[in-house]
Image: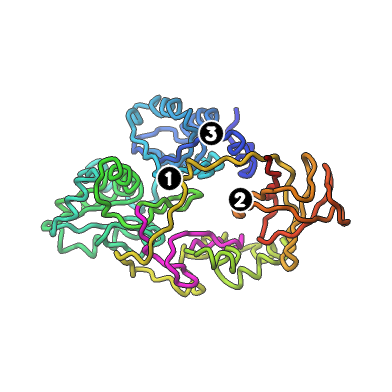
Amino acid sequence: MQLYNTLSAEERAELIDQAGKQRLTLSFYAYAKIQDPTQFRNDLFIAWNALDALGRIYVAHEGINAQMNVPAENIEAFRETLEAYDFMKGIRLNVAVEHDDHAFLKLTIKVRHKIVADGLNDESFDVTNIGVHLKAKEFNDILDDPNTIVVDFRNHYESEVGHFKGAITPDVETFRESLPIINEQLQDHKEDKNLVMYCTGGIRCEKASAYFKHQGFKNVFQLEGGIINYAKQIEAEGLESKFIGKNFVFDNRLGERITDDIVSQCHQCGKPCDNHTNCENDGCHLLFIQCDECKTAMENCCSSECLEIIHMPLVDQVRLRTGKQVGNKVFRKGKSESLKFKHSGELTDTALATAPKTTDIRKKIKVKKALLGKAEHYYVKAQVGLFTIENQELNSGDKILIVGPTTGNQEMVLDKMLVNGTESTQATIGDKVTFTVPFRIRLSDKLYKILD
């Protein structure tokens, strides 16, 4: 009985590209009493692995919280695996506005104490006594009411790239931090104001709305299905979007655009930008906003120190981080003295720029290609890549494609190369090939020949 992934992320990405079929990015959650979360987890893994469903899922005695990527052709079979459980019959699937075939590259289902870390004692209040669900039009209407206070129950790095106009956006790193802050801030408005809340997909507000009703707030409302569902509804119904900017998501996309407004800045140069990246230094992985120019100049790094580290031999990089906590526990997300243009708590409802139009990822043109081999090394100063040829032959003048999770998809024409240390016009299986690559590549990036 297989209860683990047998493919690496790179191998899975390759299979997805070869299949060339559409995949849907979606999320869902359900609060329910689950007697044996471990067995529940195992049963789900077996069922979903058979459907090539990938994602990050948390299960606990209190329910399930899932973000996933599923082949479109398997979506009905996937829904059947959910509806085999009474508490998930008719469950709403929040389908993303934008899809990415590589949103998730592994199936990870973890058993946790809670499906959302809220820091609350659920025995102290009725978690089923939740706030009123509002659909997009109802949400828009109540935002226009002068007696409404709207609160963003996401974290600072989520709200800074996009939020509802006029919302309170707590400068917090975790959901649990925001609950006491908002409770204290709104103590004088328990009876005279509408407390309206929202989050990404609705799961945080399910618990938060019950908590605030327990705290004595009389008029508590929540956005049904969160920002994801709101975006789908305003598009379908032709409504005005009172959300401005980008919706941060917890998969490889790191965000999906709701409006063309850019409301945040590159944390390194201050240019209007709302693209998140993780620092390239494996000992850091700081999450921050970085524009394309800084991404190129800093090679995906958050600081000069990290840039220096990634150019060290791998053995020295490992030595530097040995015995230290992983990066995302050392650094606060998006907060570092190295980031000169990080302004937590100073969010704007005014667009700083307009995002350029991009091609719908679902309509991207498939390039016909043949796998040649993979990257073995990159000589930074010389800007030369070393590759091992594992399939087919490579010739000078061939149009090639270098692909990797961080490198992206980079096309170029091979001008000249060294084969096993000697200049040559042809390389065959087993040869070591070096040639100039005017961009940084990573170990195990794939090398393809583009076919006519």
Can you identify the residue that label 2 sits on?
Answer: 409
For marks 3 and 1, the one nearer the N-term is: 3
Q: Is residue 257 above or below residue 101?
A: below
Residue 4 visible in the displayed image: yes
Q: Is residue 170 above or below residue 247?
A: below
Q: Is 202 covered by the magenta stretch?
A: no
Residue 21 in the figure: left or right of residue 342: right
Badge number at residue 276: none
Kindly identify the amino acid type of the residue bearing the numbered disc 3: Lys
Task: Identify the residue at horizontal 39%, vertical 58% (top origin).
Answer: 158
For marks 1 and 2, the one nearer the N-term is: 1
Residue 62 visible in the displayed image: no
Give the residue at the far right of this rendering. Answer: 422
Q: Is residue 151 above or below residue 45?
A: below
Q: Is residue 23 above or below residue 123?
A: above
- Quadrant hosting residue 92: top left
Kindly identify the amino acid type of the residue bearing the numbered disc 2: Asn
Task: Identify the residue at horizontal 71%, vertical 59% (top origin).
Answer: 437
The secondary element bearing badge 3 is classed as loop
Badge number at residue 98: 1
Task: Identify the residue at horizontal 40%, vertical 32% (top origin).
Answer: 35
Q: What is the span of residues highlighted in magenta in the rendered image? A: 259-288
State the separation of the CA atoms marked 3 and 2.
18 Å
The secondary element bearing badge 1 is classed as loop
Quarter of the image that includes the N terminus: top right
Badge number at residue 21: 3
Task: Identify the residue at horizontal 71%, vertical 44% (top origin).
Answer: 449
Label the magenta part by its dominant secondary structure: loop
Residue 344 location in percent, x, y?
38, 69
Compare residues 181 and 336 and report the one nearer the observer: 336
State the separation of the CA atoms marked 1 and 2.
19 Å
Kindly identify the amino acid type of the residue bearing the numbered disc 1: Glu
